[in-house]
Amino acid sequence: MSLDDIRGIPTIELPYETIPVTEASAGIQRILSLAYMLVWMQSENLITAQLFGRIPARQLIFLMDETEAHLHPRWQRSILPAILTVLKELEPIIDIQLFITTHSPLVLASVEPLFDQEKDKLFLFELNDNQVTLNEITWAKQGDVIGWLTSEVFGLKQARSQEAEQAIEAAQAWMRKDDMTQFPENLRTKEKIHQQLLKLLPGHDPFFPRWIVRMEADD
């Protein structure tokens, strides 16, 4: 790498070039570190068992914080299934207990095919009266990222920008004939709400048909 550093640095072959691992992206470095740690762990397990003349350990507790850190959404969707596959390949007969934390709805969506309600649990860290509590959440498949974002796990009303969410809430309030003074000045009339919806939502947004039908019916 330099005349001041004589260490040999492993390289990784990418589609466009071969680079030292120290120059790889944060996401790639994290995956490489994880892979190295898992292989080293099992290697040391086998060496230790041989030295002491005993059976290799058949139990593993795996802790990983912020599972999605630095990872592209495609990798966020595959990281946990990949880890489980690798662990089984390293040692086919092994009892694995994983403690995984995440802020990514893709990570949760990725385990829907794997989640066993007899063995697995979903917990939510919550702040109540300045105290952090750990509460079990009843597992339920949400189907996609939007479903997870609007579930009790993440608690969003809508999986969109705050401004778009507020504009839709104003539109819904107007359709219900609610008091519009609870909204900002630019969201208190049908015309102003419509302008904001046009500005903030894509033309194919599923909210538009309902809004346009109701708006035209009021004319």
Image (spheres, rainbow, N blue to C red):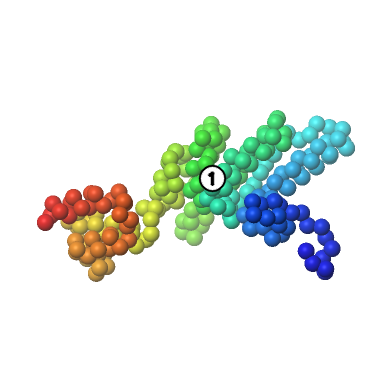
Q: Residue at x 66, y 44 (%)?
A: 62
Q: Give the x, y percent position of residue 32.
A: 69, 50
Say whether residue 105 is left or right of residue 190: right
Q: Give the x, y percent position of residue 107.
A: 53, 46
* Residue nearest the observer in this picture, 18 or 95: 18
Say whether residue 123 is left or right of residue 60: left
**Is residue 18 at all visible to an observer of this figure?**
yes
* Residue nearest the observer in this picture, 63 or 167: 167
Q: Residue at x 53, y 45 (%)?
A: 77
Q: Give the x, y percent position of residue 135.
A: 50, 46
* Residue nearest the observer in this picture, 84 or 101: 84
Amino acid type shown at disc 1: Arg
The residue where tag 1 is placed is 77
**Is residue 124 at all visible to an observer of this figure?**
no
- Quarter of the image with the N terminus in it: bottom right
- Residue 56: quadrant of the picture: top right
For the residue carrying disc 1, how many other residues have a C-alpha within 10 Å: few (<14), some (14-19), or many (20+)? many
Counting labels gives 1
- Quarter of the image with the C terminus in it: bottom left
Q: Residue at x 50, y 47 (%)?
A: 106
Q: Residue at x 30, y 48 (%)?
A: 206
Looking at the image, the residue that sits furthest to the front is 16
Instruction: Classify mark 1: helix, strand or loop.
Output: loop
- Indicate whether 173 appears above or below 117: below
Looking at the image, the residue that sits furthest to the left is 219
- Residue 90: quadrant of the picture: top right
